[in-house]
Image (cartoon, rainbow, N blue to C red):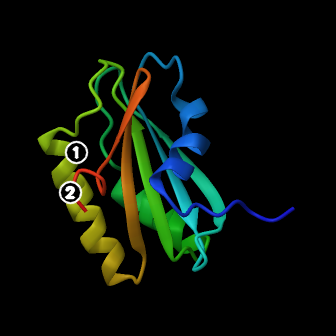
Amino acid sequence: MDAPVIATADDAAKLLRPRFDALAGERIVVLHLGADRGLLGTSEYPGSIDQADLPLRAIIGAALERDARGMIVAHNHPSGAARPSEEDVAATALLVRIAKALDIRVYDHLIFAGDSWASFRGLGLL
């Protein structure tokens, strides 16, 4: 079976939504993508009840292990607001800079909250 191709934020959201339903705490999930945006694998990192710091070394390490050419990062806000915090924006900007230096593209960062979700790219933050 061929790996799914993640061409849009909607594609990613459909794939990722079940991983965030009914979670009490925050979680980070990364989709690792090939040059054709085909899914190579996923990585998952736990957060706390109200915070999930991007584990930059682990995310980059997992991307390099899979020879990923791109990634989509996602995390949830159990509080119910699908708006990126200042910390989310700063951490994503740092991840983008590190990944770019290694020829890995961060296509998007999605935030899930309840029934809604937001895309950094859609918000003009990437």
Circle 2 residue: 125
Residue 62, position in %: x, y? 53, 63
Vertical order, 16 against 48 (above or below): below
Q: Residues within 10 Å of mark 1 (few under 14, many from 20)?
A: some
Q: Position of residue 29 (x, y in %)?
A: 49, 45
Which tag, 1 or 2, sits closer to the chain's start?
Answer: 1
Q: Residue at x 60, y 53 (%)?
A: 42
Q: Out of 94 and 33, give the one closest to the viewer.
A: 33
Q: Amino acid at mark 2?
A: Leu
Is 91 rendered above or below residue 78?
below
Quadrant position of residue 3: bottom right
| Number of residues whose C-alpha sits closer than 10 Å to that of mark 2, classed few (under 14), some (14–19) or many (20 or more) | few
Residue visible at 36% across and 52% down? Answer: 109
Circle nearer the viewer, 1 or 2? 2
Residue designated by label 1: 88
Quick check: 109 above or below 68?
A: above
Depth check: give the residue in front, 109 or 10.
10
The residue at the point 31 percent across, 82 percent down is 101
Q: In the rendering, at what x and y percent does residue 55 appear?
A: 36, 51
Q: Nearer the viewer, residue 102 or 108?
A: 108
102 on left or right of 8: left
Residue 65 left/right relative to 54:
right
Q: CA distance from mark 1 to mark 2?
A: 11 Å
For the N terminus, the quadrant is bottom right
The residue under label 1 is which amino acid type?
A: Asp
Q: In the drawing, does residue 44 fall left or right of residue 25?
A: right
Residue drawn at point x = 81 percent, y = 65 percent = 2
Secondary element under disc 1, as helix, strand or loop, is: helix
Q: Secondary structure at mark 2?
A: loop
Total marks placed: 2
Toward the left, the furthest residue is: 86
Residue closer to the observer: 82 or 85:
82
